[in-house]
Amino acid sequence: MTEIPKIQKGCIFYENGGEIIYKDIPVPKPKANEILINVKYSGVCHTDLHAWHGDWPLDTKLPLVGGHEGAGVVVAKGENVTNFEIGDYAGIKWLNGSCMGCEYCQQGAEPNCPDADLSGYTHDGSFQQYATADAVQAAKIPKDADLAAIAPILCAGVTVYKALKTADLRPGQWVAVSGAGGGLGSLAIQYATAMGLRVLAIDGGDEKGDLCKELGAEVYVDFMKEKDIVKTIQDATNGGPHGVINVSVSELAISQSCDYVRALGKTRYC
């Protein structure tokens, strides 16, 4: 272990909805299976608000240091860790650790593990200078990577990449991205384009349309202007897209998008 301070700065709250305090807190010690990461950059996710408010069915730990989009440098590791070395770049994801023995973990669906440990929710997260993560689930980051740019990839990027990866799509097929002009959607367009997919972007407003086209979308559909959005999408994709990625966050947008997704005959994934 390198020389590590015992006290650090972090943002912590002691009750859901209570004051978030920036203060001195202890530096955590990594367990046998964990690495300790000196967090250089952290993104902020909408889930962090839910953790703070405590309005999800799963209870948060209290007190809690939030954050699950942390990128930094490994400064210590437990005695059982073999896949990270001191000085490596590492990322703190939403899934901090899982049992690796249940049916979900063995199928590659670790986030569904009944004993999943969640960064910034059941495990103190990246809103501190030093944070721990299970070495199996921590993200390995190349040494030449821009840590500031990597941080939001650890949640928003992972989310849409996993959706595209498991959608069973082939290069040349159409994928519709609902909410394409937002944070997750803009990443989904870039990943889908890099995978050789044809992207139909769905969102509202000319500014978002310009962004989606700039990122690689072949077609942009403004749901606020279309009278028959299902027909518009079917006409643009010769009968309907082969997959749909829905990253809308408002209940109205989700309701609307699911309505027309169900009407698209070829769609295999939502």
Image (spheres, grey):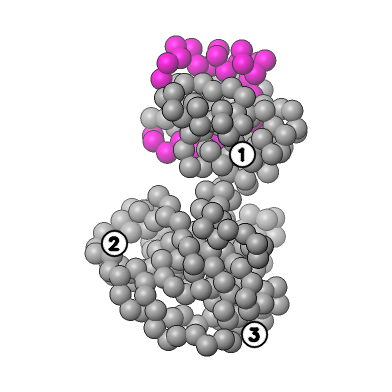
The numbered mark, 3 or 1, whose residue comes first in the sequence reads 3
State the image coordinates of residue 134 (x, y, percent, origin top left).
Answer: 58, 71
Residue 42 - label? none
Mark 2 or mark 3, which is nearer to you? 3
Quadrant occupied by the N terminus: bottom right
Residue in the picture at 47% in, 21% down: 222
Quadrant occupied by the C terminus: top right
Residue in the picture at 41% in, 70% down: 128
Residue 260 lies in the magenta stretch: no
SS label for mark 1: helix
Q: Specify the segment rendered in magenta.
A: 224-251
SS label for mark 3: loop
Residue in the picture at 74% in, 28% down: 172
Residue 190 - label? 1
Q: Residues within 10 Å of mark 3 (few under 14, many from 20)?
A: few
The numbered mark, 2 or 3, whose residue comes first in the sequence reads 2
Residue 79 - label? 3
Residue 16 - label? 2
Q: Amino acid at mark 2?
A: Asn
